């Protein structure tokens, strides 16, 4: 299940995609409320703009080499491989974790969320 196609993604590509999403949110045509909304839209934009082959972009998935075999990551770019336990996982070229701090929560709620992120 290995693709020979290369993914041409760079940090600059990700920054451009995020800027695009922010611009759409400012004009009111995009309103994410969950991290999954952002991950799904990034997936869509990567495919639409031809940044990566569709068979190399994966949402909410496990990766090869993670210390916690059950930990899932928001968006991963890479090839599908088999782990030692025979379950599929991604050999990552890039891992994107999305963290949102939406309006409507107290400063304390955001602080708890932020502390939880740092402990991960």
Image (tube, helix red, strand yellow):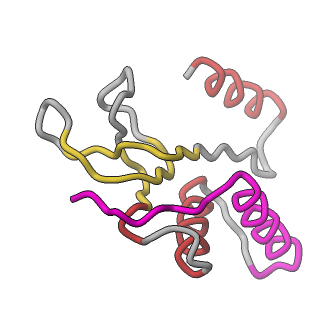
Q: Residue furthest left?
A: 86
Given residues 105 and 50, the one toward you in this image is 50
Residue 2, given in percent of the width and then of the height, sits at 26, 57
Span of residues in magenta: 1-29
Task: Give how far across and how far down residue 4 sits, in percent.
Answer: 34, 63
Residue at image coords 66%, 60%: 33
Percent of width and height locating residue 25: 80, 71
Compare residues 1 and 34 and report the one nearer the observer.
1
Q: Residue at x 55, y 74 (%)?
A: 44
Q: Position of residue 105 (x, y in %)?
A: 77, 43
In the rendered image, residue 4 lying in the magenta stretch gets the answer: yes
Quick one: 70 or 65, which is closer to the camera?
65
Q: Residue at x 78, y 65 (%)?
A: 16
Residue 19 vs residue 30: left or right?
A: right
- Judge whether 28 appears above or below 86 on screen: below
Question: Which residue is at the front of the view, 78 or 44?
Answer: 78
């Amino acid at each position: 299940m290995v693709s020979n196609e290369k993914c041409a993604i760079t940090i600059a590509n990700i920054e451009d995609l995020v800027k695009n999403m922010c611009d759409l949110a400012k004009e009111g045509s995009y309103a994410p409320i969950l991290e999954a909304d952002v991950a799904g839209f990034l997936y869509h934009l990567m495919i639409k703009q031809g940044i990566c082959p569709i068979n190399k972009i994966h949402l909410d998935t496990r990766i090869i080499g993670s210390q916690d075999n059950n930990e899932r990551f928001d968006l991963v770019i890479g090839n599908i491989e088999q782990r030692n336990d025979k379950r599929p996982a991604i050999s990552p070229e890039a891992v994107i974790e999305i963290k949102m701090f939406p309006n409507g929560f107290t400063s304390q709620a955001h602080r708890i969320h932020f502390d939880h992120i740092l402990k991960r």
